[in-house]
Image (tube, grey):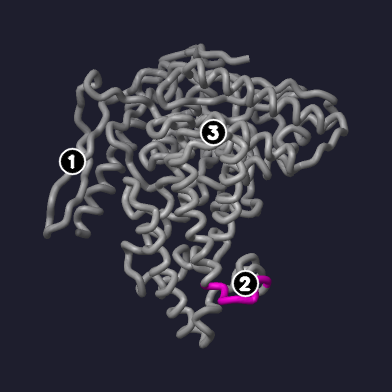
Amino acid sequence: MASSSFSAQGPQTTFLSSSLAPYEDGMMDSYAVDRHAFDTQLELSDNLCILRGVHPSHTQSLSTGMRAEHGVSTTTNILSWIAQCFVKEEQGEVFASALCVTAGAATLHIAKNSGLPCPVDQEFGAAFMARVSSFVNRRLAGERNNDQQEVDEFVRMSLRHSWVRIKRKLRLIGTKMELPQEAAECQRYISDLIDIWANFISRRFKCEVTAAERSVRILRIANKLHRGGSVDVLKDIVFQVIVGGFRVATDEQAFNIRYKEFTHIIDCAQMLLESDFLKAPLADDEWHTQIGPTNVQCLLRLRRRLERITLYRTGAEYFVRHGMSLFTKVTPSAQRVNVGLQWVGNVPEPGGPPFTLREYFRRGRRHTTMNYVPVKIAASPVHIHPEVALVHHLDALGIHAFRGAIGVSKAPCWACVHYLECLCRAAGLQKQPWHLPETGKKVQPAWRVPKALPGAAVLDMDVVNCAVDYLVKRAREKRAKC
């Protein structure tokens, strides 16, 4: 059942001991809280809620096409898939999700960057959770349908709801800039980089240029065709992804045809992500030097966009094949789990003015720095980013996310990640009680920080000042290197 209200009343401070009760003594010691540092803040408000600590999750391997980021749990990746499924607009929409599980019940908490959900969001949320509930309870009852059929249903649902968003992602695959370019131009640019890479690998390993690509799936296709080499197959796959994706995004087709072509693009995109060519930009320093930073950034951007497209299916695959652990590990004897949805409503008012990005030129190059100054909110609406809103929402309700995992539809803003780190330290926790995907290392313009905790004005200013000081220091260090 969806809920759009937000409770500003946090639990009593005695919740801290009860939340740590299930853990062993050694685990409790690692999340010890400095109570002396909070004496003054506790006097300010009876509703002050110290952020709870939960046991950290471990990095696990993911299914094909899903990158296991360092320090990010598989639960976080599944939740990021769920958050992405809710995005329907071309730009501007960002969602965050967390799962809270109790005996016989599981509640998915969803936050949106613009605040309360619209009717379309609520309608899709109800349909999505009905599908999840049906799948979970059928599995708990011992029924096991075809896994691929279950995955297809989730992909079809996402394709219908997020088609406007998916179209933009398909048009942008392979582009050097943020604006769509001609598909043929994009394909030629990537093909030229493949030729440079093939010659580079040939010189390094003394092999044929046409056989430089050695990834399993592409090599298998090359051997089966008995013509050309693996590099030619790699170019053909790039053509199908870029040109095919652009055509699917621009042509009006029946849904079944669109779905078939979309899944074919996902197949090709997964092969590209597994290829040696697109793995090289991740760690090969010699290859970085060979092509220069601009081309490296282009290939990394291509990887990110392919991962975002393939996540619509790989996320569903991982949920269908491994997602039951989200429910059975907490309620192993339950014959039925009530799966619900709760929307995050309004969050505490921002605790300080936003900062803006100011451009300046030095030595002929354009740079940006931060000015922490007030801006006209009426002229430029500012919303708290959903991952931060979700943390405050869970804290105010006195609950913690399952395995501390928070999923996001977009890489978290660097400022938000650092703000949450400051908030964790201010609460006296030695480790962060939540796990976010890797930050995009970008600071969003007009970023605002909310009040740290309900009623804790002193703690709020400490956290805000610490976060802002660090951000400004980082900007100055970057400026000094130029």
Q: Secondary structure at mark 1?
A: strand
- Discs 1/2, front: 2
Quadrant of the rendering where the N terminus is positioned: top right
- Between the residue at mark 1 and the residue at mark 3, the CA separation in whole angstroms equals 31 Å
Q: Amino acid at mark 1?
A: Arg
Q: Secondary structure at mark 2?
A: helix
In front: 358, or 30? Answer: 358
Residue at image position (40%, 18%) is: 348
**Disc on the earlier residue, 1 or 2:** 2
- Discs 1/3, front: 3
Q: Quadrant of residue 129?
A: top right
Quadrant of the rendering where the C terminus is positioned: bottom left
Label ID, residue 336: none
Disc 2 packing (10 Å; few <14; some 14–19; many ≥20): many
Whole-percent x, y for residue 460 in the image: 36, 25
Residue at image position (46%, 54%) is: 242
Whole-percent x, y for residue 77 in the image: 59, 43
Residue at image position (29%, 42%) is: 471
Whole-percent x, y for residue 25 in the image: 69, 38
In front: 334, or 308? Answer: 308
**Disc on the earlier residue, 3 or 2:** 3
Q: Which residues are magenta?
A: 224-231
Residue 32 at least partly seen: no
Residue where numbered disc 1 is placed: 358
Residue where numbered disc 3 is placed: 83
Q: Amino acid at mark 2?
A: Ala
Relative vertical location of residue 421 with respect to residue 193 in this rendering, above or below: above
**Disc on the earlier residue, 1 or 3:** 3
Residue at image position (59%, 15%) is: 2
Q: Is residue 38 magenta?
A: no
Residue where numbered disc 2 is placed: 222
Q: Quadrant of residue 138?
A: top right
